[in-house]
């Protein structure tokens, strides 16, 4: 079963604009991770935020975590056509081992 | 760059046939996961291992699926007998420690006719 749910399901923006994706989850977590998947490929890890952290940055990526609302957001600034992909949030819950993925957001960046 | 290797990349088979998918995790990684991805269900966790021991395979249909790690360099996922509803992309992923980021292979696209 999926732990996280992403919103929106699909997002289409112009190159240079910012893209924001949201993720909500149901149970307490150890950490939350964001992944990207290009068509026909495996998922690639982008960023990990621990349950005691509120914000994290990596290049053009900014992730926030609100454990009281059980939600996270991924912001991609100054988007590029190459950012076109599906983005998934994933949470580590339960025994602290298994990583459970949400349904993903399909991002399309038009040039 | 170290990577997770999955074989075969594509597999087309007839209903009732046995299918074996293989995964070579990154050397030194001690957690291995199997996921299945479909349009309808998204990414489903099928099974995962730590130090070659199965920790959870509750996501797998037990009557037809089996997952093993015969050694630290090989993980296998077997379906016997296969059914059309098993058609999906199967991903293997490995990680260095529990709760750490996972490295994914490029998947095996299975089509059962």
Image (cartoon, grey):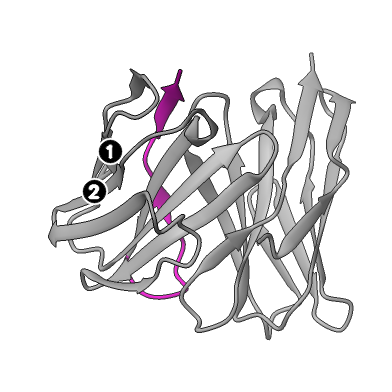
The image shows residue B24, relative to residue B72, as above or below, that is above
The image shows residue B56, relative to residue B72, as above or below, that is below
Circles 2 and 1: CB distance less than 8 Å? yes
Q: What's the chain of the residue with tag 1?
A: B
Q: CA distance from mark 2 to mark 1?
A: 6 Å
Query: Which residue is labeled 2 in the image?
Result: B76
Q: Residues within 10 Å of mark 2 (few under 14, many from 20)?
A: some
Residue shown at the point (54%, 33%) measured from the top left: B85
Nearer the observer, A103 or A85: A103
Secondary structure under tag 1 reads strand
Query: In the picture, which quadrant includes the C terminus of chain A?
Result: top right
Q: Is B72 one of the magenta-colored residues? A: no
Q: Which residues are magenta?
A: B96-113
Residue shown at the point (34%, 20%) measured from the top left: B13
Q: Percent position (x, y) of residue A18?
A: 86, 39
Q: Percent position (x, y) of residue A47?
A: 59, 58
The residue most toward the left is B71
Residue A22 found in image quarter = bottom right
Secondary structure under tag 2 reads strand
Q: Percent position (x, y) of residue A49?
A: 63, 70
The image shows residue B70, relative to residue A9, as above or below, that is below
Question: Left of B35 or right of it: where is A86?
Answer: right
Q: Which mark is residue B21?
A: 1
Of helix, strand and loop, which mostly describes the magenta segment? loop
Q: What's the chain of the residue with tag 2?
A: B
Residue shown at the point (35%, 29%) measured from the top left: B16
N-terminal label among 2 and 1:
1
Number of marks: 2
């Amino acid at each position: 079963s999926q732990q996280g749910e992403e919103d929106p399901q699909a997002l289409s923006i112009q190159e240079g604009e910012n893209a924001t994706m949201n993720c909500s989850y149901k149970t307490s977590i150890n950490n939350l991770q964001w992944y990207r998947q290009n068509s026909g490929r495996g998922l690639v890890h982008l960023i990990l935020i621990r349950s005691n952290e509120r914000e994290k940055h990596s290049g053009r990526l900014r992730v926030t975590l609100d454990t009281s609302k059980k939600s996270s957001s991924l912001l991609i600034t100054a988007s590029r056509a190459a950012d076109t992909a599906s983005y998934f949030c994933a949470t580590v819950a339960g025994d602290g081992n298994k990583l459970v993925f949400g349904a993903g957001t399909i991002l399309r960046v038009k040039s | 760059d170290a990577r997770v290797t999955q074989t075969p990349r594509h597999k087309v088979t007839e209903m009732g046939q046995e299918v074996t998918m293989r995964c070579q995790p990154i050397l030194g990684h001690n957690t291995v996961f199997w996921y299945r991805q479909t349009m309808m269900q998204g990414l489903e966790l099928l099974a995962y291992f730590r130090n070659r021991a199965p920790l959870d395979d509750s996501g797998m249909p037990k009557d037809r699926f089996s997952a093993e790690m015969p050694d630290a360099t090989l993980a296998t996922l077997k379906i016997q007998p296969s059914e059309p509803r098993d058609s999906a992309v199967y991903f293997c992923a490995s990680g260095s420690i529990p709760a750490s980021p996972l490295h994914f292979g490029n998947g095996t696209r299975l089509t059962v006719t």
